[in-house]
Image (cartoon, helix red, strand yellow):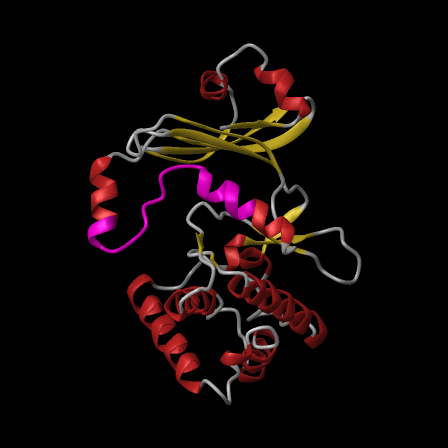
Amino acid sequence: MLYLNEEFRKLFLGSDPYKVLAELKGNVYRQVKTRKTFQFEYNGKSYFAKLHTGVGWLEIFKNLIQFKRPVLGARNEWVALNLLKKIPINTMTVVAYGEQGWNPAKLKSFIITEDLAQTITLEDYCLDWLKSNPSVFVRRVLIRRVAIIASLLHSNGICHRDLYLCHFLLHKKEGDLPKLSLIDLHRALIRSKLPTRWILKDIAGLYYSAMNIGLSRRDLLYFIRQYSILNKEFTFRGNKTFWMLVEVKALKMYKKLGPAR
């Protein structure tokens, strides 16, 4: 499988895309044994690339034993990003994607997306909210945007699996109404109907990441109201047990991991 937009057809013309990407110079953001994420420039534009080199049978078996679906490469993110565009949820634009091989333990794959420049993560944006609380309008608009994105994800059968404030990007030049984009979907889980346990995981992770930004009880209830517009089975009055479990799970994460930032 190989998808290239017009610009990257020129870059990879007559070459092995994997070799070209491996030799590209750029700013490495994350590098582990089987995956490398880096930013580079091409034709005056900024891009992000993720290279996957195969997770190995040990990792596959470890996930299967734990009843988890192993992430084998870039395909997960490729499928998720295309689905987000259709929903629609603002996210990264894919300019190139490739997958090579048949052995699941040794799959080679890559994905390249346009750099979402002039943005700041919500984690960074909300960092000083305890000291300098924003206006109710700004706080409510952002809470509503986050709630709608989460609700759209789950009502369309997508669990992000890493739904934290650091994966919401706030665009700096969007006038009075802020624009948010969702990133980092390489572990996303997609089902025709999402089981409640996966929704719980996402919402608890989101709440955990927002615990230290000074949200009031009214803010939290406002999030629940906005989230349950699309997911009516999760209203606070109709499903208090779910929201109690969200708080319990988030507090466990906080106790185990400490503050998100």
Task: Give above or below for 136 relative to 145.
Answer: below
Could you tell me residue 121's position as x and y percent?
57, 53
Task: Say if 40 sits above or below 17 in the image.
Answer: below
Taking depth in this image into account, of 194 and 58 the one nearest to the observer is 194
Which quadrant holds residue 33? top left
Left or right: where does residue 70 sit relative to residue 182?
Answer: left
Q: Quadrant of residue 168?
A: bottom right
Image label count: 0
Asked if residue 41 lies left or right of residue 18, the reply is: right
Give how far across and how far down residue 4 sits, in percent.
60, 26
Where, quadrant-wise, is the C terminus in this rendering? bottom left
Q: Which residues are magenta?
A: 64-81
**Which residue lies most toward the bottom here?**
237
> Is residue 77 one of those drawn in magenta?
yes
Picture layout, residue 162 above or below residue 53: below
**Which residue extends farthest front?**
192
Residue 134 visible somewhere in the drawing: no
> In the figure, 72 relative to 108: above or below?
below
Identity of the residue drawn at 58% across and 84% down: 218
- What residue is shown at x 54% (from left), y 66% (from top)? 155
Residue at x-position 65% and y-position 71%: 139
| Residue 100 within the segment the image draws in magenta | no
Residue at the far top in the pictured view? 14
Q: Position of residue 77 (x, y in %)?
A: 49, 43
Residue 195 point in image, percent of width and height = 40, 67
Splitting the image into 4 quarters, where does residue 144 fall?
bottom right
> Along the line of sight, which residue is nearer the eye, 205 or 148?
148
| Residue at screen point 57% across, 70% down | 131
**Quick check: can you spot residue 109?**
yes
